[in-house]
Image (cartoon, rainbow, N blue to C red):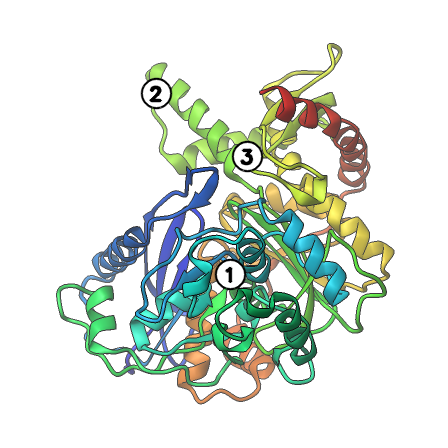
Amino acid sequence: MSDPVLGIELGSTRIKACLVVADDPSQILATGSSEWENRLVDGLWTYDLDEVWSGIAAAYADLVAHAGSAPTALAGIGVSAMMHGYLAFDAAGGLLAPFRTWRNTNTGPAAAELTELFGVNIPLRWSIAHLHQAVTDAEAHVPSIASVTTLAGYVHERLTGRRVLGVGDASGMFPIDPATHDYDAELVRRYDALAGDRLPHPLAALLPEVLVAGQPAGDLTAEGAALLDPTGALRPGVVAAPPEGDAGTGMVATNAIAPRTGNVSAGTSIFAMVVLERPLGAVHEELDVVTTPLGDPVAMVHCNNGASEVAAWAGVFARFAEAAGAKLDTDAVYETLFREALEGEADAGGVIAYNHLAGEPIAGLSAGRPLVVRPPDARFTLANLMRSHLYGAFGTLALGMRVLDDEGVALDRMYAHGGMFRTAGVAQRFLAGALGAPVSVATETASEGGAWGMAVLAAFTAAGGGDLAAYLDDTVFTGPAPATAEPDPADVAGFAAYLDRYRAGLDVERAAIQSL
């Protein structure tokens, strides 16, 4: 048997590792994970970089425990992580400011200025918005900046010594030219003219080199192997895939890289990706254009808030069960609550749940205040409460998807992945109703998500690259067709009624932000 391939993804709440068969990455050999959590420090969401490495080592150790023995050699390796954000380093590799994640919404002035300058939407979370906000605010560290990267780029550089990014992750730093699969040279020129001498180097010198899927992105060094496996069992020298963002690995994990296909990834954030046949007709603040791991344009509807509020309520009910002497494991809690949601009314009985723990640009919210709101005549039952929470997780996403519909963007199939879809037939069914389109979930890999998608990209690189679409069709997705939920007319109508109330009630959210 050939050496296996390892994929690692650093998500917002979990770091996952996934080991697959090199010749058939649909076969998962073992998985491992560790938990971590962002912190609000001085008004900004961040993670400590020491926790990156302790978390990766813990996830790898958990994978080894599940595998039964530690791999000594790998055929390939790849790292992905939450996209965007801001990691700035000096010439000696020292971190100049705490890691600023995608979740921060302090970059409004910079994003607005760049959107006008470039003629394309620059969301608040993009790396160039973070960099330009620091430049605009004349932050003390700016004169010392020698490089800027993403979390995946940082981890990859520590593992291999190469300062590179996959094109999908790079497209969340700065706009990509679809013809060159590199940063848009004209927009780089415009930014250099805008920044002038406020930056110590031209922008191109600060950004990582861009690679497309299948290109070798360096080899695992001895120092990198020790970071992954402090026991010393893992040998260096394995080829690495270009580091990618969670959006790109989600597209691969759902085989949604061709035009007219899309996917929804649901975690701490939730986003939809639709591969475009043609450029968008206008600039929309609800949509940003990123790319597939091959560099093809994709319309992204990104929502800062996803399933965290559902998880918080699940924790409340788990504690209630334990206090009542009926302790349930986490999976049983979710199974029970999600199944109960199926018994709820199609419009959630008038109960509205807002999942906004952080600001939400699509909804016009500068900060987050999770709320459950209902008029006195609402039918407030457990079933309606849980259906409202699941609908609420898709609420802002649905607002953005309406903009895509207005653009006439065609969609033949939508795939979903993430932990929300582990309970079969519930979140998937509600998402189909919210989108008014069939939603498919590959149940055996749905919860592994991006870590598995990154392992597939690493196997593709180890195999020498080539035609990624053919590789996915002929090597990876050769098993039974994924489970598909067709939109139920009652769910479609019920969600539409829910969304009307949801949109109208956003003023309640804004009042809460001002008052609490």
Any part of residue 361 in sight: yes
**Closer to viewer: mark 2 or mark 1:** 1
**Closer to viewer: mark 3 or mark 2:** 3
Q: Residue at x 64, y 54 (%)?
A: 110
- Height in image: 493 above or below 405? above
* Residue 357 tag number: 3
Instruction: Give the residue type at disc 1.
Output: Asp
In the figure, is residue 275 to the left or right of 455?
Answer: right
Mark 3, Cα crowd under 10 Å, few <14 / some 14-19 / many 20+, is: some
- Looking at the image, is mark 2 or mark 1 earlier in the sequence? 1
Give the residue at mark 1: 246
Q: Residue at x 67, y 27 (%)?
A: 509
Any part of residue 484 in sight: no
- Height in image: 452 above or below 397? below
Mark 2, Cα crowd under 10 Å, few <14 / some 14-19 / many 20+, is: few
Instruction: Give the residue type at disc 2.
Output: Glu
Residue 237 x, y percent position in the rendering: 25, 83
Give the residue at mark 2: 322
> Camera-side residue: 516 or 419?
516
Look at the numbered disc 1 and give the secondary structure of its residue: helix
In the figure, is residue 171 to the left or right of 36?
Answer: right
